[in-house]
Image (cartoon, helix red, strand yellow):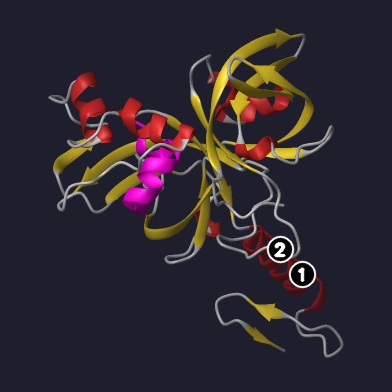
Amino acid sequence: MFTGIVEELGVVAAVEPRPAAARLIIDATKVLEDVSEGASIAVNGVCLTVTSWFPHGEGQAFAADVMQETLDRSSLGGLRAGDRVNLERPVRLADRLGGHLVQGHVDGVGVVLERRSSTSTTTSAASTTTTASEVASTVAFTTVSTAASGDAAATGGDPVTFGPDTQWEIVRISLPPGLERYLVEKGSITVDGVSLTVVEITPADATTPATFTVSLIPTTLQVTTLGRRGVGERVNLEVDVLAKYVEKLVVAGEAAGAGSSSTPVIHSGSGQLS
């Protein structure tokens, strides 16, 4: 179990193909401080098992095996050497719950559709005039480059200084079918392993999928991969597991106990027991 508070940015050192699987080699520091064989580490929101760890370059790295099912159902299948990834160790019972309860089980993959900040105009997938370099420039902000931001976060260097007008960024992400019902405004969602608050939800229609927006503060943009995700890129999504449990209770209760004096029923929409 995790909380969606990223501890560090790791770097993919290698992706080694295996039959119906792959082995990831990831350079890391902080998450390896108390590592042991079989330990869990969330990589972009996917719970993986550490199979080994070892010196690598000037630091350390760990290896994790990823089955084909995970490669197919998450964005990990698209990782390449040099990519940065969000890393988090499991929460301990004595730790503060800084984000929300995160399982590390991806429910679906969304696509970044739009980014807008206080220093840039809207960049959307529908734009016909925005070039790839312009998208990269918008994502990186006007005051820093993506390399500078990542290096500071990964190596513990000086934090990036954001300008007075660069205070946050709004990001719109598509929702795979079936996930919209688990989101509520001001509720929680995990995007690439980062615990975020849902700002707005737009229902699906006949031609476009459901979408949601999140508001990212400079710290999140600096110390996670979300500061680098351009329009069109895929992100792992995990909805709040509590919503799924509530749905199951509601459906089971209404099917088995409606009108019964012996079985409590949770009436959807009212939140009342009878």
Per the image, is 227 magenta? yes
Instruction: Name the foreground residue: 155 vs 180.
Output: 155
- Which residue is labeled 1 in the image? 255
Report which residue position mark 2 lands on: 245
Three-letter code for the amino acid on which mark 2 is drawn: Tyr
Q: Residue at x 43, y 42 (%)?
A: 223
Q: Residue 97, how many percent across, how many down? A: 62, 64
Above or below residue 33? Residue 19 is above
Q: Residue furthest right?
A: 262
User: Compared with residue 44, is residue 268 higher up or lower down, i.e. above or below?
Assistant: below
Q: Please name the residue shown 28% across and 49% down the image.
A: 169
Q: Please, is residue 173 above or below residue 145 in the view? A: below
Rendered location of residue 258, percent (x, y): 75, 79
Pointer 1 or 2: first along the chain: 2
- Numbered range of the magenta stretch: 212-230
Relative to 130, 44 lies left or right: right
For this view, does 230 lie left or right of residue 66? left
Q: Amino acid at mark 1?
A: Ala
In x, y percent, where is residue 234?
45, 31
Q: Of helix, strand and loop, which one carries label 1?
A: helix
Distance, label 1 to label 2, CA atoms, is: 15 Å
The residue sitting at 76% across, 73% down in the picture is 253
